[in-house]
Amino acid sequence: MKSKLQHTGMILLILAGLLVTTYVSANDDFVFWPDADYDPAIPTFETVLGYQPGERITWHADVVRYFEALAKAAPDRMSVSSYAKSWEGRELIYAVVTSAGNLSRIDEIKANMQRLADPRKTSRSEAKAIIEDQPAITWLSYAVHGNEISSTEAAMLTAYHLLASQGDKRVADIMRDTVVVIDPMQNPDGRDRFIHHYEITEGLVPDPDRISAEHNEPWPGGRTNHYYFDLNRDWFIMTQPETRGRVKLIQEWYPVTFVDAHEMGSDSTYFFAPGAYPYNPHLAKNQRSSLEIFGKNNARWFDAFGLDYYTREVFDEFYPGYGASWPSYFGSISMTYEQASSRGLVARQYDGKDLEYPYTIRNHFITSLSTAETTQANRQKLLNDFYNYRASAIEKGKTGDVRSYLIPT
Ligand SMILES: [Zn+2]
């Protein structure tokens, strides 16, 4: 009996050894982007922060430090500015990444979007002339929920990749034909609250157990801002300084593409557009068809990488106070992307697999690039659709039954 038990124990040990070997070798193959050739003049994560992407969860102050280091290394192609301060005094920053030619005339590019946004002043032929030579703006917003951590690291990688990639035609096209605006942390107070709890509870090695102390985030968690507002419900009510600053900024730029990158439960995979049925009837036909175009390009990349994802379930576009819907109402293509969360450096999923932080970062990184690529490939269509959306709103206002709504305070 005893020897039989020992025998079983040995087999289990060998099996465990095999599993560990497989696991480690799978990790050795892990890359954020295959065959990337990076310009050494652009500072990496490691040179600025001292660790590889996904080894730590990056604090607000360090995210700002990294973005400033990138802008310092490539001031002709990237700028970093602040658009608001959180309740706790943290700067909300955004980065503008594009070609040197575009950055040198960035005010003109913004002014052109204002002209396209107002068909009362801009005729169809004038709009056509503007669109001929106008880069389209992709707006990538990350981590409005502070405990949805991976997207902020993906924001840093996206900026790095766009600046440092050499000999990659896709990146060159994105830089030439578009402007990528990156808002890496929409809720820095919530993010730092999450990291603080995570770091004071972690041990020598990350614990994937979902009931470990580091995964047991106490109320109120990092989701909300300082006053426990869910900033992803605040977009049309605009009660919080983070939202107010953001909305004002976005209306200066009028991006044709807007992404709000989130995380969802650890047992899920990845979600992108098109969203759940029934569809919001207030979306224009062109907006709906463009959602499909963005979704298909994301799917193409996920298929190439062999990654799981889904569409058309769970996430709808009805509530106008979401980041993924409010920009639709000025004529943008607005989407939520959702990655299963490791809620720390690693989480064990229901089937026993470990979901690791670098993996979750990579997925948001892939869709960030894929989205910019889709904007680039559909530049003229998206700019035309934007102008037509604005023109159709004026037409509807002239002919519709309702002229205005009065809302008592
Ligand atoms: Zn979220």
Image (spheres, helix red, strand yellow):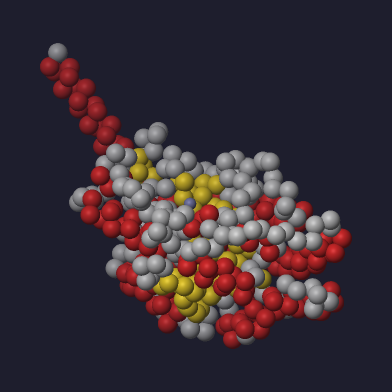
Is 167 situated left or right of 67 in this image?
Answer: right
Is 160 situated left or right of 89 in this image?
Answer: right
Q: Quadrant of the N terminus?
A: top left
Is 319 situated left or right of 47 in this image?
Answer: right
**Residue 13 to residue 386: above or below:** above
Q: Residue furthest right?
A: 399
Q: How many marks?
A: 0
Q: Residue furthest left?
A: 2
Q: Position of residue 126 (x, y in %)?
A: 81, 79
Q: Between 257 and 369, which is closer to the camera in this rendering?
A: 257
Q: Position of residue 153 (x, y in %)?
A: 41, 61
Work out whether residue 83 can be spotted: yes
Q: Between 268 and 73, which is closer to the camera in this rendering?
A: 268
**Residue 353 to residue 281: above or below:** above
Give the residue at x 28% y 54%: 197
- Residue 222's quadrant in the figure? bottom left
Work out whether residue 259 can be spotted: no
Give the residue at x 22% y 31%: 13
Q: Between 380 and 383, which is closer to the camera in this rendering?
A: 383
Q: Position of residue 177 (x, y in %)?
A: 65, 73
- Residue 402's quadrant in the figure? bottom right
Q: Quadrant of the C terminus?
A: bottom right
Give the residue at x 12% y 17%: 2
Q: Position of residue 296 (x, y in %)?
A: 65, 51
